[in-house]
Amino acid sequence: MKLLYTIACWLLSLCLLQTAVAQSGYKVVAHFPVSGNGGWDYINLQPGTNQLYIAHGTQVNIIDKQSGDSLGIIPNTIGVHGIAFVPALGKGFTSNGGSNTVTVFRLDNHAVIDQIAAGENPDAIFYETYSKKIITCNGRSKDLSIIDPVAHKVVHTIAVGGKPETAVSNGKGKVYVNIEDKNEIAVVDMNKMEVVAHWSIAPGQSPTGLVIDNNTHRLFAGCDEHLMVIDADNGSVVADLPIGAGCDGVVIDPALHYICTSNGVGNMTVVKEMNKDQFEVVENVPTLRGARTSCIDERTHTIYMPTAAFEPLQPGEKGRPKIKPGTFQVLKLVHE
């Protein structure tokens, strides 16, 4: 009897240990209300500051990452999708899909400096450190605008052969672009300013969010219920991992070796990078419906996601539900 009791206790301890290991440590700790109505897209944290920037309809809301207090807005960014920063120049840039422009603003007081004509429907935007250029992914014209952040002008346009959703850099002259309508990643050589490869990511479809681990040379492409892991050196598929539906954003925490996908269905899938070829889905952390994009503060391991509450669909009604006025917010998830 004592032996059976000992075995039972051991099995119970093992189960509890496995349960503990299976948890990511992430949970939602705050809901920051944000003024204004309308849709949203990317959220970004200005490096070295407490300032969160949220693309929100026709403006960019800026809030404090600790308190959620409003720090201002950048107006007249029609159909804004994303925000990028060049701290060395004291400038920020927004991609305005509704006006086919990029707004240039000052980081110290958010005053608008300039408007740059870009490609059609500029979506994701980021600062590429190797070329020292701002890059926009233009969904309708199916190309990239390469922008000189000093001169405020497009210096190259690179056709990518499909709808570019988002892009990342290896910091050594290669940029990788999710091509949403072709289920592939296009590789751009920033020295040649041209596409040098197209890599299929099948069975992944409609890739959206994309991050890179430059230590392991692995790309992580968020697709429809799949996270595809791609070798950034040769384009081979390394792993295919299940995630929540409606992913539109992926972040990476190099210190924790976590890749987290923000899923519009209402959860965040946390994947552990065991090594460059082995990965484990740790947990689907509950968030809120619509929280499909995200950014991470790597220093504190904190993740932020914008969303809102929705009106219920009426019988026979299709498409996206209407946003309830006054419910726009940012979720704060901490790692404990």
Image (cartoon, grey):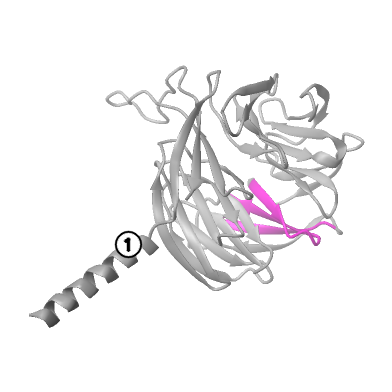
Could you tell me which residue is drawn at 42 percent across and 20 percent down? 324
Could you tell me which residue is drawn at 80 percent across and 56 percent down? 194
Which class describes the residues within 10 Å of circle 1: few (<14), some (14-19), or many (20+)?
few
Query: Is 226 displayed left or right of 97 in the figure?
Result: left
Could you tell me which residue is drawn at 47 percent across and 34 percent down? 30
Is-magenta flag for residue 1? Answer: no
In this figure, what is the number of numbered marks?
Answer: 1
Mark yes or no: residue 2 visible. Answer: yes
Part of the protein shown in magenta: 165-190
What secondary structure is marked by label 1? Answer: helix
Image spot of residue 11 (x, y percent): 22, 73
Choose between 122 and 94: the one closer to the eye: 94
Choose between 187 and 142: the one closer to the eye: 187
Image spot of residue 237 (x, y percent): 55, 69
Among all residues in the image, which is located at the extreme left?
A: 1
Indicate the amino acid at tag 1. Answer: Thr
